[in-house]
Amino acid sequence: MDLDIDTVRIARTREDCVLRPGEVFLGGGTFLYSEPVPAGVTGLVDLTGLGWEPWSVDGAGLRVSGTCTLAELVAGPGALGGAPGAAGPYRALGIVGECVSALSLSAKVARTATVGGNLALGLPAGSMVGLFGALHGQAVIWMPDGGSREVAGADLVTGAGVVALEPGEVLREVRVPAFALARRTVFRRASLTPNGRTAAMVTGRAGERGPRIVVTASVTAPHGLYARDHDMLDRWLDRIGSTVGWFEDTHGSARWRAAMTRRLAHEALDELGGAA
Ligand SMILES: Cc1cc2nc3c(=O)[nH]c(=O)nc-3n(C[C@H](O)[C@H](O)[C@H](O)COP(=O)(O)OP(=O)(O)OC[C@H]3O[C@@H](n4cnc5c(N)ncnc54)[C@H](O)[C@@H]3O)c2cc1C
């Protein structure tokens, strides 16, 4: 961004989050400051001034605030989860580090970029939606009239750069219920080059109704399935291909992404103990 704007307000209270004409929210600014000023934008409202605790965990589960940076997410909940596949009460969080690594961010950018900004952008390669989709996360959204509403983490992104946030709504936090934290989880990703943009990502959780498989990056919005077996998984992937189709850009063709997603999804189901 060339910073050709008129105002920057630091939000300190919820009332400060009511946008004035021309204003948009600012998280870490790693996207906003890297792009031309969007048409009509004349001011920024900095959410980091609200002083939200980045994350907390108690008997009800995990809460991750919208302003939690990706580095804080890894150092906090990611560390609680331990190494991928390790046992323990927070074992589901073992995929946090991998999900953050799936973003093509330097350590410096990860110290500033926020979970809320990543979700609110809704890019196909935005891995936070795949993380919270697998963890059964619920997004808590502050509405401009003072009310709040909740959206399932996996339903937050509805298209490439399209999210279920109305103008003026703030992504306050994502809540992961306690029951999901102790489940086994799985992570797989593919990109054209080792450090390239994620082109297909599959996350999953050993679920109460069978393994939960969530597909992102190769589609414009997340898709999730409780997969009883590999046949069911194949039929579901066929349906995604024939109805919504596979995403295509310079980071991978639709055909390649479809093939990679299928391979990764079957691997994920195997790891979660799906029937043959
Ligand atoms: C080198 C580089 C590589 C990148 N790679 C990737 C990548 O691989 N995948 C990817 O998805 N992104 C990528 N990005 C884009 C971006 O950095 C990340 O998505 C980051 O997580 C955005 O977070 P932020 O806090 O910086 O968002 P900001 O830039 O502050 O804001 C982004 C958008 O979200 C809105 N917003 C921010 N917080 C909230 C909130 N709490 N509630 C409501 N709206 C909010 C803002 O109004 C804005 O529209 C990359 C950026 C850079 C510079």
Image (cartoon, rainbow, N blue to C red):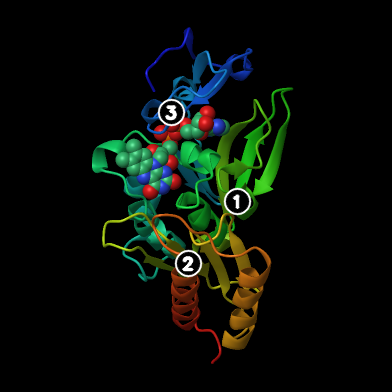
Disc 2 or disc 1, which is closer to the eye? 2
> Circle 3: is it few (<14), some (14-19), or many (20+) Cα within 10 Å?
many
Of marks 3 and 2, which one's residue comes earlier in the chain? 3
> Residue at the location (61% across, 43% down)?
162
Amino acid at circle 2:
Val
Of marks 3 and 1, which one's residue comes earlier in the chain? 3
Q: Could you tell me how far apart the alpha carbons at marks 2 and 1 are, in whole angstroms?
A: 15 Å
Q: Could you tell me how far apart the alpha carbons at marks 3 and 1 are, in whole angstroms?
A: 23 Å
> Residue at the location (37% across, 32% down)?
30
Tell me the SS state at disc 2: strand
Extreme-bottom residue of the structure: 276
Residue 252: quadrant of the picture: bottom left
Label drawn at residue 202: 2
Q: Residue 89: tell me if it is visible.
A: no
Residue 219 rendering spot, x and y as whole percentages: 55, 60
Is 224 rendered above or below residue 172? Answer: below
Q: How many marks?
A: 3
Residue 7 rendering spot, x and y as whole percentages: 48, 8
Residue 106 rendering spot, x and y as whole percentages: 26, 43
Q: Is residue 114 left or right of residue 194?
A: right
Q: Which residue is mark 1?
A: 153
Q: Which residue is mark 3?
A: 32
Q: Is residue 118 left or right of residue 106?
A: right
